[in-house]
Image (cartoon, helix red, strand yellow):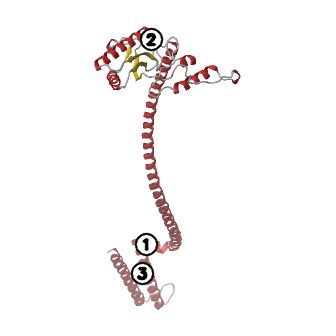
């Protein structure tokens, strides 16, 4: 709309100026006026030329007043061209920078993809490491519990060791009432006795054994049934059956099961075997020669002789009578002590 108004204004201004010029030319020609000493014809031509110039000038002035672009095109064209060329150069540089930026962007995207892949892998490894740490923590807790149990066990074993060592020291320093496998007393049950008579004989024998143990300072509790010995239940019944089934007289021995000290009951077990000749008088059971220059202790030689004699006992005897030393205990044991 603005363009049409401008064109209309130019047409009106041009028409007015042309009309004025035409009227001036006609008046000058009619009155034969002259300007600057020119002939009337030439004056009319000059007026026409001036009118055209005025029309062109008026058009330019009107356009310049009405439009900033026209003023810029008329007065700043060269600067605009230079600025345009500069903008074109800047545009080319910016395109190059854009292309370089796109390449950098692609490179950065590639590095980002690699970084994301590495991050995923590292995250998985970290999760595995965390799981391993949790497993190690559980294993550590389990091992610590085991160590604690072992410490408690070690303390208990240490306490038991000290107790045993103390007891062993007390036993070594104390008097031994009966040694292990020591025969306390023996008796003979004759063939032909009834079951009741055999049982009565065994009970009398055990009372005598209890009396011997009591004189040797052994002591039992009130609930044991004896004052100084302890005999497992059912032993008498087994011995009664063995005696009744034997083809002849039977030797019954009460034997100490383990070392015992004064003040405690003696654990006793019964041995029985046929009353028969084992060795005749004067039989040599074992012999050896001792050389004082050999460096062997005489005690060891005697012990070897006693062991050889012990192996020659009768096979029917589960344990034959051991050599006895005065005061109780075997002779071999007395030698070692």
The numbered mark, 1 or 3, whose residue comes first in the sequence reads: 3
For label 1, the SS is helix
Gap in Å between the C-alphas at discs 2 and 1? 138 Å
Quick one: 234 or 135, which is closer to the camera? 234
Measured as percent of width and height from the top left, residue 161 is found at 49, 23
Crowding near the residue tagged with mark 2, few <14, some 14–19, many ≥20 C-alpha atoms within 10 Å: some
Q: Nearer the viewer, mark 2 or mark 1?
A: 2
Task: Identify the residue under disc 2.
Answer: 262
Measured as percent of width and height from the top left, residue 311 is found at 52, 27
Crowding near the residue tagged with mark 3, few <14, some 14–19, many ≥20 C-alpha atoms within 10 Å: many
Q: Which mark is residue 69?
A: 1
Label 3 near label 2: C-beta < 8 Å?
no
For label 2, the SS is loop
Measured as percent of width and height from the top left, residue 170 is found at 50, 14
117 up-or-down from 265: above or below: below
Quick one: 270 or 192, which is closer to the camera? 192
The outermost residue toward the top is 215
Task: Identify the residue under disc 3.
Answer: 55
262 up-or-down from 129: above or below: above
Quick one: 139 or 55, which is closer to the camera? 139
Q: Which mark is residue 287?
A: none
The numbered mark, 2 or 3, whose residue comes first in the sequence reads: 3
């Amino acid at each position: 709309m603005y363009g049409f108004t401008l064109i209309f204004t130019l047409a009106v201004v041009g028409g007015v100026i042309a009309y004025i010029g035409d009227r001036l030319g006609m008046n000058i020609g009619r009155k034969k006026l002259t300007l600057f000493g020119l002939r009337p014809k030439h004056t009319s031509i000059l007026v026409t030329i001036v009118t055209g110039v005025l029309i062109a000038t008026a058009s330019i002035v009107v356009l310049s007043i009405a439009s900033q672009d026209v003023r810029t095109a008329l007065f700043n064209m060269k600067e605009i061209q230079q600025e345009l060329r500069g903008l074109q150069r800047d545009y080319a540089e910016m395109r190059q920078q854009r292309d370089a930026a796109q390449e950098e962007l692609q490179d950065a995207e590639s590095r980002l993809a690699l970084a994301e892949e590495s991050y995923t892998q590292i995250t998985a490894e970290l999760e595995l490491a965390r799981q391993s740490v949790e497993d190690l923590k559980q294993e550590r807790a389990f091992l610590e519990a085991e160590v604690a149990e072992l410490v408690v066990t070690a303390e208990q074993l240490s306490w038991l060791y000290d107790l045993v060592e103390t007891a062993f020291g007390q036993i070594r320093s104390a008097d031994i009432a009966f040694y292990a496998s020591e025969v306390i007393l023996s008796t003979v049950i004759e063939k032909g006795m009834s079951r009741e008579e055999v049982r009565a004989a065994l009970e009398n024998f055990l009372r005598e054994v209890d009396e011997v143990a009591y004189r040797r300072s052994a002591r039992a509790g009130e609930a044991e049934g004896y004052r100084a010995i302890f005999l497992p239940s059912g032993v008498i019944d087994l011995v009664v059956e063995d005696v009744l089934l034997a083809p002849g007289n039977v030797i019954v021995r009460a034997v100490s099961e383990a070392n015992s000290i004064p003040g405690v009951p003696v654990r006793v077990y019964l041995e029985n075997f046929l009353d028969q000749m084992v060795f005749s008088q004067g039989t040599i059971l074992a012999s050896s020669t001792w050389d004082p220059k050999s460096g062997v202790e005489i005690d060891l030689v005697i012990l070897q002789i006693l062991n050889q004699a012990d192996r020659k006992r009768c096979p029917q005897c589960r344990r034959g009578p051991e050599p006895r030393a005065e005061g109780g205990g075997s002779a071999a044991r007395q030698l070692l002590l």
